[in-house]
Image (spheres, rainbow, N blue to C red):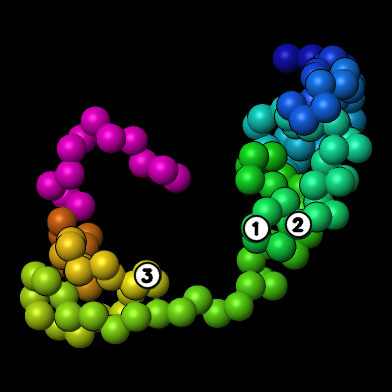
């Protein structure tokens, strides 16, 4: 399939911008399959303000952003007792107490009983 320049509209400012063949090739070389949803000016502004989280990564999933995950603080872990096997485990969230919390092994075992029509987030 031959690539051609695409005219797109920015989701932030509604300005028309061109997604060039060169940019499309660059995106493809990075494994990115979606076209950008923001014009270069809005992408630069968003990158400059950090994009809301993740050291400048775009929440739109369209590449962009420097730093990424390596600039993050280490994630706080919480010690819990597994609701299934009783073993002590570390989890990356603070349990609320109204739902069971599992160690990694029991959580994976629980996953096999989930409904098959749910799609993976990843």
Q: Is residue 100 visible?
A: yes
Residue 50 numbered tag: 2
Is the C-beta separation of discs 1 and 2 under 8 Å? yes
Who is closer to the viewer here, 13 or 27?
13
Magenta segment range? 111-122
Q: Looking at the image, which residue is at 34% across and 72% down?
A: 94
In this image, 101 relative to 28: left or right? left
Residue 98 is one of the magenta-drawn residues? no
| In the image: residue 61, left or right of residue 5 | left
- Mark 3 and mark 2 lie on one chain; the one further toward the N terminus is 2
Q: Residue at x 77, y 30 (%)?
A: 12
Q: Is residue 50 above or below residue 31?
A: below
Answer left or right for 74 relative to 41.
Answer: left
Label 2 CA crowd tier, 10 Å (few <14, some 14–19, many 20+):
some
Is residue 118 highlighted in magenta? yes
Query: Helix, strand, or loop for circle 1?
Result: loop
Q: Residue at x 20, y 85 (%)?
A: 88
Rendered view: 42 above or below 106 = above
Task: Give the image location of residue 18, x and y in percent.
Answer: 89, 21
Q: CA distance from mark 1 to mark 2?
A: 6 Å
Specify the principal SS of the magenta part: loop
Disc assigned to residue 41: none
Q: Position of residue 1 (x, y in %)?
A: 73, 14
* Above/below status of 21 relative to 49: above
Q: Which residue is mark 1?
A: 53
User: Mark 3 highlights which residue?
Assistant: 93
Percent x, y for residue 27? 76, 37
């Amino acid at each position: 399939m031959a690539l051609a320049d695409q005219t797109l509209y920015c989701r932030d400012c509604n300005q028309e911008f061109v997604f060039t063949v060169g940019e499309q090739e660059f995106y493809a070389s990075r494994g990115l399959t979606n076209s950008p949803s923001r014009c270069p000016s809005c992408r630069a502004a968003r990158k400059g303000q950090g994009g809301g989280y993740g050291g400048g990564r775009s929440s739109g999933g369209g590449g962009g952003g420097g730093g990424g995950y390596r600039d993050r603080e280490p994630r706080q872990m919480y010690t819990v007792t597994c609701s299934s096997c009783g073993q002590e485990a570390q989890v990356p969230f603070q349990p609320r107490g109204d739902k069971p919390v599992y160690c990694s092994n029991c959580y994976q075992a629980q996953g096999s009983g989930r409904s098959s029509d749910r799609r993976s987030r990843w």
